[in-house]
Amino acid sequence: MPIIDGDSDAQLAVAAALAGAAVVRDLYGKRLARHEKSAGDFATTADLAAERAVVDLLRGARPQDAVTGEEGGSTGAAGAHRRWLVDPLCGTLNYAVHTMLVGVNVALREGTAITAAATADPFSGEVFWTDGVRARVRRDGTDEELTPSAGSALVDVNLDPPFPSAPGFRAVRLLGEPGFTERFRPRVISSTLAVAWVAAGRRAAYVTDGDLRDSVHFAAGIALCRAAGCTVTGLYGEPVLTGSGGLVAAADAGTHAALLGLIRSTG
């Protein structure tokens, strides 16, 4: 869809995420070339094509803004006040083996704050989005408020490396804690689509290690969770996005406190 200069950043994020999702959906199931990046990590033709679709739309609508894409790297001034963070296909390995658990993430960082963000699910047609104040999901052109809930007791835990907090924290040890299985049920979908699900009440929480500063993978989901009213910190309760402290995004304060206690007990 064409974007005019007067459209809001949030609606631009939605449109960009949907543009990437359309490419991901159209190429699903086709024979795709793999582009090796590092040990165990690769991109497909779909990752590259989806990123082009997203970035082309952003540059056309906001030519003065900087952009960082997972595949194409950064353009614009290094210290730009406005920078778009683009993860065109989160869950590449899922996608490559014909598993429909992926997301397309687009977020705008202004200074140190994420002021607009969207995560699109190419296969459900849903797009979760925020203007930095409220969080919503759009289905068939209709928006609904996101309402977090811990009722499912499902906690998605990211088991993909790297693990900068090791040996103090390893996600796999959290899963073995008796207190975890007494209260929660683990899930591993290997896509940050699950972070948006915390904001939407489909997961009780999400836990990951890693350095999340200017993260193309996590910026959108964290913004969604914050706007929806979730409790969001690093692994030990520190402010998120300030270093290599990982992420605990929980539907409510009680769930968050329980997870932080379990994480401390694994150290």
Image (tube, rainbow, N blue to C red):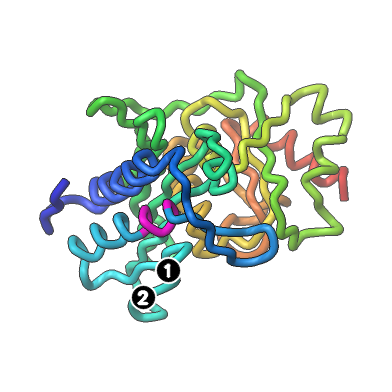
**Magenta region: which residues?**
46-51
What is the three-letter code of the residue carrying label 2? Answer: Thr
Is 7 situated above or below 180? below
* Number of other residues with Cα within 10 Å of mark 2, as a class: few under 14, some 14 to 19, many 20 or more: some
Q: Residue at x 49, y 56 (%)?
A: 33
Residue 136 lies in the magenta stretch: no
Label 2 element class: strand
Q: Residue at x 61, y 19 (%)?
A: 151
Q: Nearer the viewer, residue 194 or 238?
A: 194
Q: Does the magenta stretch mainly form a helix, a strand or a loop?
A: helix
Q: Are marks 2 and 1 in contact (CB under 8 Å)?
A: yes
* Number of other residues with Cα within 10 Å of mark 1, as a class: few under 14, some 14 to 19, many 20 or more: few
Label 1 element class: loop
Position of residue 176 measured from the top left corner of the image (x, y, whole percent): 87, 35
Q: Residue at x 74, y 34 (%)?
A: 258
Q: Residue at x 48, y 45 (%)?
A: 221
Q: Nearer the viewer, residue 237 or 93?
A: 93
Q: Is residue 135 toward the left or the right of residue 19 in the image?
A: right
Position of residue 267 measured from the top left corner of the image (x, y, whole percent): 87, 51
Is 240 situated above or below 79? above
Q: Is residue 93 toward the left or the right of residue 81 in the image?
A: right
Residue 72: mark in rendering: 1
Is 143 situated above or below 161? above
Position of residue 126 measured from the top left corner of the image (x, y, whole percent): 36, 31
Res. 242 in view: yes
What is the three-letter code of the residue carrying label 1? Answer: Gly
Residue at the disc numbered 2: 75
